[in-house]
Image (cartoon, rainbow, N blue to C red):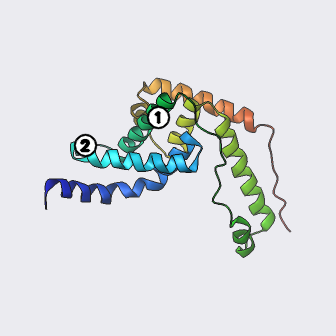
């Protein structure tokens, strides 16, 4: 087996674990399902080509996220326009069927869905530099240092952006409150 084939096999085994996380980040960046799919595909293509140059102790997940963000930034610069605004949950066509099949309280499930949609909508209303840090830290679990490497900025900048982003989210969500009525 050639070195290229070996690298390809190792990359396939290691990188596919992050496919869903990368797709979620791509959706956050592009806000378009087709563009997100293309972005993930381009990320994997470029990463597969460069995988042999990755240092052995490197963090593969943060490396993939950095590649994706750089591709996206280049696309935005090239097209000289921002991302398109489209719905995030286009895959929820069977949502009501799932709701009917569950044994949980339908009202509680509906409130959870509404709450999740409100949080997603609030995140989407944030400026892109705040949206990125929220997704990378709170949803993907990257450390401040890893985020700094992905975004190519100091860790202090990441911390201040995260603080501001969370403050903005609190303001956006402050008017929205729900109570779940429990049956006695």
Residue 163 occupies which quadrant of the picture?
A: top right
Quadrant (top left, top right, bottom left, bottom right) of the C terminus? bottom right
Nearest to the eye among marks 2 and 1: give it.
1
Query: What residue would you read off at disc 1?
Result: 75
Q: Position of residue 49 (x, y in %)?
A: 27, 46
Furthest-front residue in this view = 79
Determine the residue positioned at 54% across, 50% down.
Answer: 34
Q: Give the image quarter of residue 143.
A: top left
Query: Badge 2, how many Cα within 10 Å: few under 14, some, many 20+?
Result: few
Q: Quadrant of residue 126?
A: top right
Point out residue 119 in the picture as x, y percentages from the top left corner.
69, 45
Q: Give the mark, 2 or 1, whose residue is nearer the N terminus.
A: 2
- Against 182, is 173 above or below? above
Local secondary structure at mark 1 = helix
> Residue 144 at what x, y percent from top left?
45, 34
Task: Give the camera-side residue of 71 and 127.
Answer: 71
Q: Residue drawn 39% across and 32% down? A: 149
Which mark, by number, is residue 54?
2
Helix, strand or loop under label 2? loop
């Amino acid at each position: 087996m050639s070195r290229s084939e070996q690298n390809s096999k190792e990359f396939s085994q290691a990188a596919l674990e992050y496919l869903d996380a990368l797709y979620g980040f791509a959706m956050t960046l592009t806000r378009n399902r087709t563009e997100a799919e293309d972005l993930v595909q381009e990320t994997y293509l470029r990463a597969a080509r460069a995988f042999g140059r990755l240092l052995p102790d490197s963090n593969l997940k943060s490396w993939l996220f950095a590649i994706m963000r750089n591709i996206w930034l280049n696309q935005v610069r090239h097209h000289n326009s921002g991302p398109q605004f489209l719905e995030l949950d286009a895959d929820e066509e069977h949502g009501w069927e799932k709701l009917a099949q569950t044994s949980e309280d339908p009202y509680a499930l509906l409130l959870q869905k509404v709450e999740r949609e409100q949080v997603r909508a609030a995140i989407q209303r944030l400026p892109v530099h705040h949206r990125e840090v929220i997704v990378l830290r709170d949803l993907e679990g990257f450390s401040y240092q890893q985020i700094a490497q992905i975004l190519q900025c100091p860790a202090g900048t990441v911390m201040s952006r995260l603080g501001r982003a969370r403050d903005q989210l609190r303001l956006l969500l402050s008017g929205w409150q729900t109570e779940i009525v429990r049956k006695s």
